[in-house]
Each structure stands twice: as C-alpha cells, then as structure tokens.
Image (cartoon, rainbow, N blue to C red):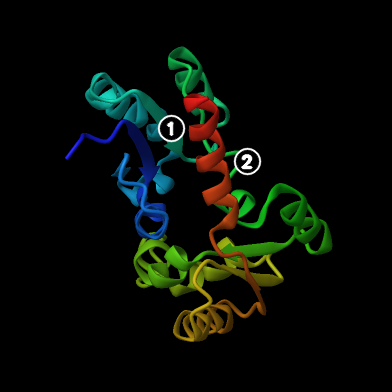
Amino acid sequence: MTRPDVLVIGCGALARELSELKRLNDWSHMRVQCLPAELHNRPEEIPGAVREEIERWRDGFDYVFVAYADCGTGGALDKVLDEYGIPRLPGAHCYEFYAGAAEFASLSDDEPATFYLTDFLARHFDRLVRKGLGLDKNPELKSDYFGNYRRLLYLSQSNSPTLEAIARGHAEWLDLDYEFRYTGLTQVHDNIEERVIEWRS
C-alpha cells in the first residue's frame, strides 16, 4: 500500500466528521491527525500546538492542510500557517464553515444573541460546558455565562434524532429558544477537496 501523500491536521472536535469524509470519499491518499478538542478552552495554545504537529509530520507528506478555522486565536494561527504556506478551513469558527459564510452571516444577523451547537458540542456539552465552566458545582454562574443569549441554534452534521433531542435538552437547561439547521458536511468536503485538487493540478 502506498503511503498517504496528504496530511490533514484537524481539531479534535472534527475528528469524527473528518474520518467519515475520508471513509465516504475513499480518500486513501489522506491521513487525518487531530489535536485535543479541549484546546478550544485555551485558544491561545492552538497555534503552538498546530506548529508542533506541522514540524512533526510535514516531511512525510507532500501536502498539508489544517482543518481549523481561526477558532479564537485572533489571527495567530494564520501567522503560523503563513510561515509554511499551509491553508486552513475558511472562517472564524466551525459554525461558519459548517453552515457556509453567507448562511452563517444570515443566521447571525437574524439573531446575534445565539449560542451555537454542533454535533460534537451536543455530545460533549456536559464535559465541555457544564463541567468545563464549573457550572456543575456553581450552577448560579449559568446566568453570568449565558444570560445575554436568547437562542440556541443546533447546526447538525448528522441529522440524528437522538442528538437533536439532546441538543433540545441543552437549550431547555440554558432557558434558550431552540432552533435546528441541518448543515451536513458538504462545506468541509468541498473545501478540502478543492484545496487538494488545486495542489495536484
């Protein structure tokens, strides 16, 4: 078996989706290497962690792509990627590249006070939000964190009734209006495929 010639360094919050895209599209030429999703709680550490992965793996691959948005790094991730000439997913965060820039802008304009969920965040809400923010021990802080939100919008990649029920429960716990949008993985697929096609042409 020939070695994969494309490396995708991804956010752990996208690991399931990236693996699914690789399987569905038979991207045998691609290796997916993901960093811990918990870095989202420490976005200042994302650029350095991505740099370490680039240095660790890049000599073994012909092409490297980073499956992160800016993710709260304030442009610091782009500065690292510019040094290596490596592209990434577009946008400020995963909500934007899942929904697409135009659709996300419309959703944001419709209700700026929106808390967004993805499949990953719906699954791991208790660990990353309730426990991650200390709300399991100090529930009185919930209004401090979420008091300015009015809507929870679940951007679903899998269209799973089970996950939708879970997301609806999170909205109820946060006392927010609930809305649902199915995004699928089209935007992520097209962006990765387009970049790889450009590189190979």
Q: Residue at x 25, y 26 (%)?
A: 57
Percent of width and height locating residue 42: 40, 42
Query: Is the residue marked by circle 2 packed among few (<14), some (14-19), or many (20+) residues within 10 Å?
Result: some
Percent of width and height locating residue 6: 35, 33
Tag 2's secondary structure? loop
Q: Which quadrant of the figure has residue 80?
A: top left
Q: Is residue 164 above or below residue 188?
A: below
Q: Mark 1 — residue? A: 65
Q: Is residue 67 above or below residue 78?
A: below
Percent of width and height locating residue 69: 53, 40
Q: Residue at x 49, y 25 (%)?
A: 199
Residue 71 shows up from this direction: no
Tag 1's secondary structure? strand
141 or 132, which is in the foreground?
132
Residue 4 shows up from this direction: yes
| Residue found at the far left of this picture | 1
Residues at badges 1 and 2 in contact (C-beta under 8 Å)? no
Q: Residue at x 46, y 79 (%)?
A: 163
The amino acid at mark 2 is Gly
Q: Mark 2 — residue? A: 91
| Residue found at the far top of this picture | 83
Marked residue nearer the N-terminal end (1 or 2)? 1
For the N terminus, the image quarter is top left
Left of 75 or right of it: where is 113? right
As drawn, the label of residue 108 is none
81 or 123, which is in the foreground?
81
Picture mark count? 2
The amino acid at mark 1 is Phe
Q: Is residue 198 above or below residue 25?
A: above
Query: Is the residue marked by circle 1 packed among few (<14), some (14-19), or many (20+) residues within 10 Å?
Result: many
180 or 87, which is in the foreground?
87
Percent of width and height locating residue 83: 46, 13
